[in-house]
Image (cartoon, helix red, strand yellow):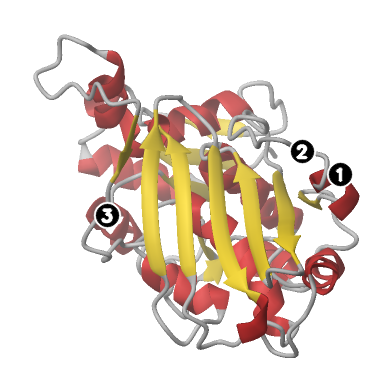
Amino acid sequence: MKPKIFIDGEHGTTGLQIRTRLSGRHDLDMLSIPEAERRNDALREEMLKAADVAILCLPDDAAKQAVAMLEGTNSTRIIDTSTAHRIHPDWAYGFAELDDDQAEKIATARLVANPGCYPTGAIGVIRPLVKAGILPADYPVSVNAISGYTGGGKQMIAQMENTDAPDHIAAPHFLYGLTLAHKHVPEMMQHGLLDGRPIFSPSVGRFAQGMIVQVPLHTANLNGAPGVGDVHAALAAHYAGQDVVDVVPLETSAKLARIDPTELNDTNRMKLFVFGNDAAGQVNLVAVLDNLGKGASGAAVQNMDLMLSKRAA
């Protein structure tokens, strides 16, 4: 029997992307409710309980409501794409390349919290260096990032694309999260193995999809004052043996004149670059990913497939 999949919130940006990614799959039985019934809680609960895997593409409060609907039953496994459960100890963190055993943790979990798009890039470069003993856990980390405007969901898409909208955004690029209290910061801390709050400066550009995340470091303040090659080697060792996260060779990075945030659009991959200057004692770690791919919908599908691989367990 085919596994039953229900996307709760399938008509939102992330849900639509997941639905598109699964549209050619003949190994799944997709459960669905009409858009007009999306607030019909009784129908939602029925679909949630009928599913083998429910993917929640909802705001935090609605995601918590969906989880509450499933209390007392262990039959439905859940992937939550909201921020509601990303640091909850009972939820597996859905970044399969996080550690060597993370894919197995996701595969055997009932509850999986999908990572955020910005944190995927930031944690992707930070955590391996902390684990390798290069980056002190109390280092004053800064994370600077730009995302395509689809990361803001349907409301921001309309603000950016509809010039007649009363709240139309005409700027080619803008910063936000100016109070330094962005909801992704606790996620970056916990899964980045950081003791202190990073300064996180997110921004949005006038392009639909794609993302660049940067973490600059002073090597003199790292353990052992490593060179650029040492930092690169630590990242390469961490991600060896898998094909989702690509640590770009130093010689390739040295030839680049610019980085395109849209390079990996419509994929579930992430590229990590190490740029640096040993004489200046500086390194800039750069992650490129699709904010709707490895940063959201692509990761959710990857996690679903891992969970279904252990369906009989």
Label 3, secondary structure: give it: loop
Nearer the observer, disc 3 or disc 1?
Answer: 1
Q: Is residue 232 above or below residue 267?
A: below
Residue 140 coordinates in the image, percent (x, y) = 47, 79
The answer to the question of whether label 3 and label 1 lie on touching residues, with beta carbons closer than 8 A, is no
Left or right placement of residue 192 versus residue 254 in this view: left
Q: Which residue is mark 2?
A: 256
Q: On the rendered image, what quadrant is the C terminus found in?
A: bottom right
Q: Sort mark 3 into few (<14), some (14-19) or many (20+) by Cα contacts within 10 Å.
A: few
Which residue is pictured at 55% across the width and 74% down the height? 192
Left or right placement of residue 60 versus residue 266 in this view: left
User: In which quarter of the view is residue 105 placed?
Assistant: bottom right
Residue 77 coordinates in the image, percent (x, y) = 53, 58
The answer to whether residue 80 shows anywhere in this view is no
Q: Which residue is mark 1?
A: 252
Q: Which residue is mark 3?
A: 177
- Amino acid type for the residue under numbered disc 3: Gly
Which residue is pictured at 27% across the width and 65% down the height? 180
Q: On the rendered image, what quadrant is the N terminus found in?
A: top right
Mark 3 / mark 1, whichever is N-terminal = 3
Q: Is residue 138 above or below residue 191?
A: below
Residue 288 coordinates in the image, percent (x, y) = 63, 44
